[in-house]
Amino acid sequence: MILKKPEKHNSPVIKLNLPDDSFKFQPLPKPSGAYPYHLSLDAIAPADANKIVFHMVGDTGSIRGLAFQEKVVGAMLRQFEKGEDHPDFLFHLGDVVYNHGEASRYYEQFFAPYSKYPRPIFAIPGNHDCDVNMESPVSYSSLEPFMAVFCDTERRRVSFSGDTNWTSMIQPNVFWTLETPVANFIGLQSNVPKFGIITEEQKAWFVEELKLAATQRPEKAIIVCIHHAPYSADINHGASLKMIEVLESSFAEAQVKPDVVFSGHVHNYQRFEKEYEDGEKTSFIVAGGGGYDQLHSIVNRDDENFTADHPFFEGVRLINYCDSQHGFLKVKVERTEAGIEIGGEYHAILQKVEGEAFQTSVVDTFKLLAKEGVAI
């Protein structure tokens, strides 16, 4: 007798009967740089005028063991040893360390594993990075260690980096824009609660950043990065209605839709596409399989704890996913005759193959043509 596998959802879902944990919200730290919180890639490393390549990954830390994280890092490093299109930087989608963003956790979960990564690492904070351990013997404020690592006022050795002598990054704020020759990366800070919270101040900044980025089309793509996944079909979180509302209302107010939205939080890979009423499409990609040992599977259609019935999900469909292997994205944004192209591959980590570690399999590829102008 052959058992039929349960059918999976092919659209976002929401988890039913969840308590409200908005009380976990933490005040944002003071910015380290000046408004409007921009950082040029050229200020950190030379950039090609017509192409950038980057790794992207989220949820890399873990307090239960580093085996999966080490495999992901090892596979990324392996790509520098062979082939072309070596990444210019890594963009981290949050949850660098677990469980409460403590400085004492950074060495084991971030500095040591990434000490050999040869390019700059940028980041937005995840919910665990923002949280505070009230039982910690060392008192600290939300995101204080994250700021020391990623949002310093100058590049210098991080005091708690141990023998790695890690050099801090100079991002101007926990929400900020990375400017590159072919794309603007608008990074948001979505705080501690399970489905995220964006302050009104941050949302107002976001709307203005979208408007500004739109004035640079078609020469630059618009990429939005946020930790909490707006759309998801996973069994642990499901979609965040709060993040959908913030993003979509901001797109409407700015009259700008980005080319792609990247997120983490959910420990797997998912690629959604949303088609709007005007016919335009935007991709929403989850890449949170970066190392936390527990992965999140896609929900079965017969699971009564979830529903896909919500007006926010109209026009949204799940194109592809990988929920059984850790991995990372490698993305290339390139100026072509057709316009700015965004091409990506999701590399899933394989078991040790023929005596060689850190092998990957490309389980999804995508190619997007960036939008040419403001339209909504």
Image (cartoon, rainbow, N blue to C red):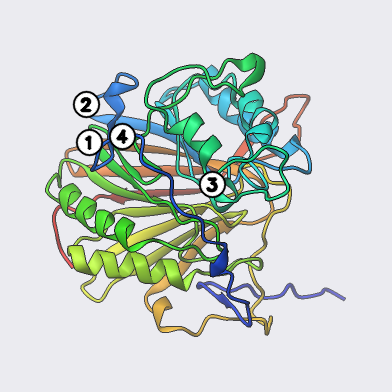
Could you tell me which secondary element the residue under label 3 belongs to? loop
Which residue is identified by label 3?
Answer: 142
> Viewer-nearest of labels 4 and 1?
4
Q: Work out whether 214 lies above or below 31.
A: below
Q: Work out whether 54 lies above or below 316.
A: above
Could you tell me which secondary element the residue under label 1 belongs to? strand
Q: Looking at the image, which is closer to me, 33 or 62?
A: 33
Q: How many other residues sit within 10 Å of disc 2, few (<14), some (14-19) or many (≥20)?
A: few
Q: Are marks 3 and 2 in contact (CB under 8 Å)?
A: no
Task: Specify which label sits upstream in the sequence, 1 or 3.
Answer: 3
Could you tell me which secondary element the residue under label 4 belongs to? loop
Q: Are marks 2 and 1 in contact (CB under 8 Å)?
A: yes
User: Looking at the rendered structure, which numbered label has been put on residue 335?
Assistant: 1
Which residue is identified by label 2?
Answer: 49
The kind of residue tagged 4 is Gly
Task: Specify which label sits upstream in the sequence, 2 or 1.
Answer: 2
Q: Please tell me which residue is depicted at 57% across the width and 45% down the height of the picture.
A: 129
Looking at the image, residue 354 sits to the left or right of residue 145; the answer is right
Q: How many other residues sit within 10 Å of disc 3, few (<14), some (14-19) or many (≥20)?
A: many
Task: Specify which label sits upstream in the sequence, 2 or 4.
Answer: 4
Q: Looking at the image, which is closer to me, 121 or 204?
A: 204
Residue 348 image position (x, y, % from top left): 61, 43
Looking at the image, residue 249 sits to the left or right of residue 164; the answer is left
Task: Specify which label sits upstream in the sequence, 3 or 4.
Answer: 4
> Viewer-nearest of labels 2 and 4?
4
Q: Work out whether 77 lies above or below 178.
A: above
Which residue is identified by label 4?
Answer: 33
Residue 164 image position (x, y, % from top left): 62, 16
Q: How many other residues sit within 10 Å of disc 1, few (<14), some (14-19) or many (≥20)?
A: many
Q: CA distance from mark 2 to mark 1?
A: 9 Å
The kind of residue tagged 2 is Ala
Task: Specify which label sits upstream in the sequence, 3 or 2.
Answer: 2
